[in-house]
Image: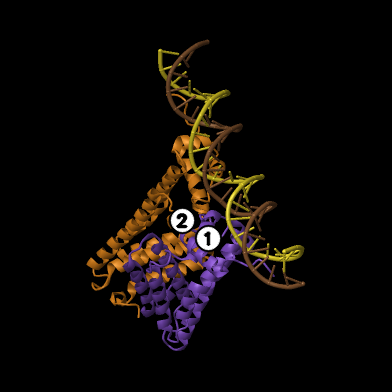
Chain colours: A purple, B orange, C brown, D yellow
Amino acid sequence: MAGVKQFDKEKVIDRALAVFWQRGYEATSIQDLVEATGIGRGSLYGTFGDKEKLFLAVLDRYVEKIGSQLMAALSNPDPRRAIARMFEVMVNRMNDPGYPRGCLICNTSLECPGGSDTINRKVIEQLSSMESAIYQVLLSAQAEGLLEPGRDMRALARFFVGAAQGMAVLNKTSADPSLLSDVARVALSVWDCPGREVAGPTD
Amino acid sequence: MAGVKQFDKEKVIDRALAVFWQRGYEATSIQDLVEATGIGRGSLYGTFGDKEKLFLAVLDRYVEKIGSQLMAALSNPDPRRAIARMFEVMVNRMNDPGYPRGCLICNTSLECPGGSDTINRKVIEQLSSMESAIYQVLLSAQAEGLLEPGRDMRALARFFVGAAQGMAVLNKTSADPSLLSDVARVALSVWDCPGREVAGPTD
DNA sequence: AACTTGTTTGACCAAACGTTCCAAGATCAT
DNA sequence: ATGATCTTGGAACGTTTGGTCAAACAAGTT
């Protein structure tokens, strides 16, 4: 073998992640990526194929770096604390100026442009894997008697995912650190609610 | 005066609204708008100035047609019912196949492209006007003794806005009608919570 | 009927887009 | 050293973008 790569592929993905996260998929041009990564057009295409394939690699990286933190929080043995830690991790990261605002998965899910099925599938897969993880935590909470047996666990899991997405949206439009902790605190408080969500319509 | 318009400006805005709502601002090309509205390029530019100004008109129209329904629901004299009706209106509309998925305001708020300040300002203004309206409802609930005096009304209002945004995101990725009503039902249940959201950190 | 005023249409423009391609350079095996 | 192999960077390509413009047209006014 000869002609060895002059750059670290993982570092390039990280740089690309930062740009895609901040600007979105469509709004990020190849030129942006060239400047952000410091490598040439040819190297980008030679290494990743095309823009979409690079973005898929970036999505994987995001799940691996960011999503895994949520999953780790959810694996806390105390179910109540698992959910609480998940929100805590989210709030801390979103309020950390070192990260771009919002959530890449959330941003991408709203970038409809009939965008590639592969991308959309990956986004949906990620959201539903988060819902499953939360659902399992709730089930074990129920098994331990920490949640009333009558409560709708599926609805609760869906709600927590929805709250997380809502926080991602708010974080994109406002930098107020208290905003996210307010939302997270109230969202978590449903845990201690009388099980009203089993009822029918909203009134 | 002579040379009279051959089309209904309001109808054009409605058609443009449908396209922007479905595809997003950046992803909608002038050509898309020409085809959707049925009028020529020149007429579009002659009437609205440019793409951004047209979009601002579309945003106004959205607030007037869709946002107003939420505001109307919030004006219900019974505060508890006002919030419930707001969610009900949202769920019904989002599950109505006659409307594009998601929420134009929410979609736009995530389309960062350093997009025009005017657009961003309008989006933020709309979100904060929704929060204010909810906040006022909560205050009057508190005044009527329907909510414990110790609860954090600002946090509650922020939470309800966040939940609404989260629902918009979920609605964009899934068409399951039960999903949104699940989330809305749980979100509303915080009303009947013991006032735990006044506490400090999430655990 | 002629003129004025404004609208409509589609050709046209420069810029930016994602992608391709190739000459030049770098590294290893021999 | 020489050749083979792969990488690199930038020029170039075709397409699409938002925006402009002028000629053709329709409707009032006189």
- Can I make out residue B23 in this image? yes
Q: Quadrant of the N terminus of chain A?
A: bottom right
Q: Which residue is mark 1?
A: A38
Amino acid type of the residue tagged 1 in the rendering: Gly
- Can I make out residue B96 in this image? no
User: Image point 51% across, 56% down: which residue?
Assistant: A32
Report the Cα–Cα distance between label 2 and label 1: 25 Å
Residue B111 image label = 2
Residue A49 at x, y percent in the picture: 64, 61
> Which is more toward the observer, B96 or B30?
B30
> Which is more toward the observer, B34 or A108?
A108
Residue B2 at x, y percent in the picture: 45, 24
Q: Secondary structure at mark 2?
A: loop
Q: Is residue A176 left or right of residue B3?
A: left
Q: Is residue A5 left or right of residue A105?
A: right
User: Image point 56% across, 60% down: which residue?
Assistant: A39
